[in-house]
Amino acid sequence: MADVKTVTEKIGKYRWTFAALLLFSTTINYMDRNVIGFLKDYMCSPEGFGWSSQDFSYLTSIFTLFYAGFTLVAGWIIDKIGTKLGLAASLILWSAAGILSAFMGKSLGLHCFARSLFGAGEAGNFPSSIKAVAEWFPKKERALATGIFNSGSNIGAMICAIFVPWCLLTWNDQNLFLGLHGWQMAFIITGLIGFIWLIFWGKIYKSPKEKLAEGVITQAEFDYINSDADDKAAAESGDDQGSVSWGKMLTYKQTWSFAVGKFLTDGIWWFLLFWLPTYVKQQFCGDMSSEDTAFTVMITNFIVFGVAIVGSVYGGSIPLTLMNKGWETYRARMTSLLMIAVVPLLLLLTQTAAGANGMTGLVLAITIISLAGAAHQAWSANLFSTVSDLFPKKAVGTVTGIGTAMGGLGGVLVQLLAGYCDGKLGTQLGYTVMFSVCAFAYLLAWGGMKLLVPKFQKITDL
């Protein structure tokens, strides 16, 4: 970290402005996404929508399926139209779809329709963000920058842990606002926040070359951003612009390496996002009052996602430390991923720990889940960075889209499995199965990636 400070003092730090902008967009993204996770109990209650857990799993699976499908197209479009317009268009669609969810009533079919539009809009967030990081940061800083903006997924979840219950209590059936219920206000307010962020994005974001021409960044910072030999050559020749066929990208094993990593691990995070509140209630809150239950769920979510923020940022700094010691980029990245992949094995102990007496069980289980959540975010920061390690900047959006689509497909399977386990196997056995799946996913993913790309091989023929 000292090396980053030294470099920043010499050449400037404007590039970190965009890490902050992406942090806020990802926070908004996950606020919108997490609303349904904290509305699950309301949706599945007789006083609410009267859905079953299986019905809820269909809703989250539909979202995940559309999210996965549209990332294939979104990544290619973003490479073609550029980062600025691509992320703006994505945010407009997902925010509008989030607001639309407030007017779908109790119909599962209508909510699935709104959530499918929402998934299509969110498909552009990560391809745009990863492309922005590739444009504005050298390789050694990309995992750290990704870790910073990716921590927004935790912040968004933490905000929802307070905001959604507040909406339900503030605008309940006896205290309606403009005829709207609390669950509707949760969708509307989170959706509107995105349009405020859009103003800042439109005013601030430009490419390094444009910012250099405007005198906003120094020549030293521009040179540092493009200090990697291949990026420098591409920037000088203009070959870092444009797009490539996603069909052609499927012919490279490097693409499939990233896709395997996403397919096997993305669903684990989504399981935590959508099912952690339910798990805490079922496992630990059986004898609690509704107020104590709500407080317990809020606090545990704050802990899990708060610790994950640390994991996201620290995990992004691991390869930077190794590269500053002279390690080659890909070796540093894969070594970091392997170190991180071991941590989720602790999840095998979750249900044993949860069986301890009193609050001890809750504390032990949440500690384990927190460490696993932090490991996932550290994993994600480094996994995303492998794309810009292995591909030129003009292909980053496309490849990220392909991998994210595969991650979404894996997420569908995990959501359906979670719904089945919750509805058919009971709390103890069901979550034992789910935590076991989560525990081994990262080592399996690392093995698949290493098998496909055992040594560093950057694609140069695009």
Image (cartoon, rainbow, N blue to C red):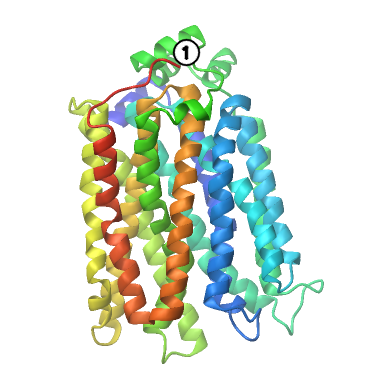
Q: Can residue 436 be seen at all in this image of the molecule?
A: yes
Q: Quadrant of residue 186?
A: bottom right
In front of the other: 354 or 415:
415
In front of the other: 382 or 309:
382
In front of the other: 263 or 199:
263
Residue pictured at 24% horizontal, 37% vertical: 451
Figure check: 102 above or below 97 = below
Q: Quadrant of residue 433?
A: bottom left
Is residue 36 toward the left or the right of residue 171 in the image?
left
Is residue 258 toward the left or the right of residue 68 in the image?
left
Figure check: 284 above or below 452 = below
Residue 431 on image: x %, y %? 35, 74
How many residues crowd around disc 1 within 10 Å: few (fewer than 14), some, or many (20 or more)? some
Residue pictured at 61% horizontal, 76% vertical: 43
Q: How many marks?
A: 1
Circle 1 sits on which residue? 235
Residue 309 on image: x %, y %? 38, 53
Figure check: 352 above or below 417 = below
Which quarter of the rendering shows the C terminus? Answer: top left
Residue 256 on image: x %, y %? 38, 36
Figure check: 284 above or below 186 = below
Q: Residue furthest top?
A: 237
Q: Secondary structure at mark 1?
A: helix
Q: Can residue 189 be seen at all in this image of the molecule?
A: no
Residue pictured at 46% horizontal, 23% vertical: 393
Residue 407 on image: x %, y %? 44, 48
Which quarter of the rendering shows the N terminus? Answer: top left
In front of the other: 413 or 194:
413
What amino acid is found at the position of numbered circle 1 in the picture?
Answer: Ala
Q: Residue furthest right?
A: 178
Residue pictured at 72% horizontal, 83% vertical: 173
